[in-house]
Image (cartoon, coloured by chain):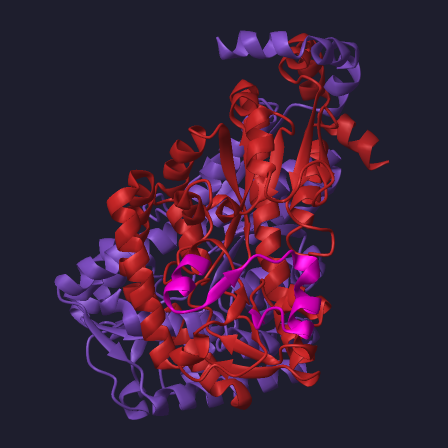
Chain colours: A purple, B red
Amino acid sequence: MRRRKFLGSVGIGAAATTLAAPAIAQSAPQITWRLQSAFPTSFAALYPAATTMAKYVEEMTEGRFRIQPFAAGEIVGPNQIADAVAQGTVEMGHTASQYYHGKDPAFSLGTLLPFGFNTRMMDAWQMQGGGLDLLNTFYAKHGFFALPGGNVTAQMGGWYRKEINSVSDLAGLKMRVGGLPGSIMAKMGVVPTAIPGGDVYVSLERGTIDAAEFTGPFDEERMGLNKVAPYYYFPSWWEGQAAVHFFMNLQKWEELPAHYKAILRAAAAVAADEVVTRYDYGNPAALVRLISSGAQLRNFNEEIIATALAASKEVYAELNETNPEWKTLYDSIVEYRDSAYAYWQLTELSYDAMMARLRTQL
Amino acid sequence: MRRRKFLGSVGIGAAATTLAAPAIAQSAPQITWRLQSAFPTSFAALYPAATTMAKYVEEMTEGRFRIQPFAAGEIVGPNQIADAVAQGTVEMGHTASQYYHGKDPAFSLGTLLPFGFNTRMMDAWQMQGGGLDLLNTFYAKHGFFALPGGNVTAQMGGWYRKEINSVSDLAGLKMRVGGLPGSIMAKMGVVPTAIPGGDVYVSLERGTIDAAEFTGPFDEERMGLNKVAPYYYFPSWWEGQAAVHFFMNLQKWEELPAHYKAILRAAAAVAADEVVTRYDYGNPAALVRLISSGAQLRNFNEEIIATALAASKEVYAELNETNPEWKTLYDSIVEYRDSAYAYWQLTELSYDAMMARLRTQL
């Protein structure tokens, strides 16, 4: 009924559009893309980025541009997405750039820098500070183009079978952690261990590993890690934020008509915001349930944080010396980070600290 | 050249689209809307939300849906936008809901709650916590529909001609502040004063007012307030965030075809994110310049914060008793706020505090 009313009220416009129909048809080709997510459907904040991207693009183009989402592993595995996109096996992926740290450590900076940004700073750096352009200059050499696809936000510092009271407790600690954070922790005595997500619970239970870091309460609650590694540490000095992206085959992206590019950018903005709001809404309630079922909150002490910072600076100095791709990104990140935190201290941090202090009196 | 290549590679799809052209033409009518912003073009984070909305909608529809942006006052004044949208004088506005506090204090909750959310919490509440639906149930009674249109983020606590060392220094203080924060400050002894933005500098210089609050360094730097009211206070206990929205005439919104609605939602997401990233990128540099040209940073002390909280709770108790529209929104906001801050304390706040502490050692 609304539709009929609508058509009535814009009769003149509709007639004008009919005249222009041949041109419209030419510029809005029928396309189908495949979108491989790195995340299983059980990741209820990250996986929906793929389905939201698909839904919005289909709706906005009235079905002319279709994107088929695939959950982790359905076409290629979570660590093969960058290559699959570059080779055109799939046109699009949704993943964390840091999964390609082994290919080039500069990939990590698309996701995180230990002692780096928080979530909003990462967004501001990408969208206003030239960060996304710098990342895309780097990604273009690997055959793909990226749009921001959400953020896991500040994480907890992982689950531990025993308390970590000093740096000496980290010596020989087998921890599920990889990429750039793993290479820093290795300098602190930790033994970074690669374990698939599905095996983490059993590995902790059997003592094959001593600790594991994942994302946050919203995802971790389902895994039951609190039952096998009850000490839940904070802050995660290595993940003040962890960005994810949509990767697109570079040639396929460049060949799109301009309005399809705008549609992908806008759909990505919806999907990216949704990832963050799902975490921000889901994490607090999940944390309450984790604590009531036995999770023990613990704070990393100053000695551990200071050692982590020293180890990070060592790793960064090495990479700045040897890897120009890394250095370009790193220099741009730390320049904004330093001024941003000076400001944050007075506004966001000052407000949040006041609210946390008054929490029981509100 | 790219275009030809592209058409070649999707020949079959393009043919199918040609056959479907008549249906497409019917469903994509030519429409032009007018979008009245509440903000002047000099507000370089807020005003571009209107032009970005217009640009994305036009690009995504290949010019079939056009939105013409107008800067503050070009069609109706900043405080007349809700009425103008409801009456169809303009189809869309970009404004702060709190400007309609005088009509009903519940409008303020679309923008802010003193001792309420930070920016990400407001977004999460709106998009995942049912907040936007609650707001739209309220707005529908006033003839319009809203989509999130950005956030001014945590603000500074205003510019003061003299230091504020105790609550007694607030007695009789004439301050440019309005709406809900103004009604709370009135209980603290402040005399809230309505002054147009353009007159703030002169009013402070002449002592017609003693203090003024605006948005943040990015906007305030241009106004030169540091020269006439050098004490720049924090935290802004009344504005941990301040959301803005796109308001649309309810009937015009409902009459849109589904894909135009999706396009407006997605364009709003791009514009909203852009407002936040422009502030987050622009504020830190502006603050540095303000300090080097004489702004004196000052912290509201605990007595002032405690008095502000007590005054806020008094105002909220009165409104909860007398205004059911307010109460519905307020109850939903504070429920999420309380659990969110418990979580924030361990993750975001804990990380940001660590970074602020280590800032000079990074």
| Residue B42, quarter of picture | bottom right
Above-or-below relation of B135 to B111: above
In which quarter of the view is residue A220 placed? bottom left
Judged left or right of residue B75, residue A358 is left
Q: Quadrant of residue B350?
A: bottom left
Tell me the residue at 28%/59% (across/down).
Answer: B314
Q: Is residue B205 magenta?
A: yes
Which residue is most to the right? B1
Q: Tell me the quadrant of the picture where the C terminus of chain A can be found.
A: bottom left
Nearer-the-camera pick, A174 or B117: B117
**Picture residue at 73% right of the left edge, 18% below the top:** A25
Observer-nearest of A295 and A189:
A295
Residue A76 visible in the current orientation: no
Q: Which residues are magenta?
A: B182-211
Residue A229 horizontal/vertical position (percent): 19, 70
Residue B61 appears anywhere in the view? yes
Q: Position of residue B163 (x, y in %)?
A: 52, 83
Relative side of B99 to A134, left or right: left
The x, y position of residue B168, in whole percent, is 40, 79
Q: Position of residue B213 (x, y in %)?
A: 56, 66
Q: Residue at x 69, y 19 (%)?
A: B12
Identified at 69% across, 84% down, the residue is B292
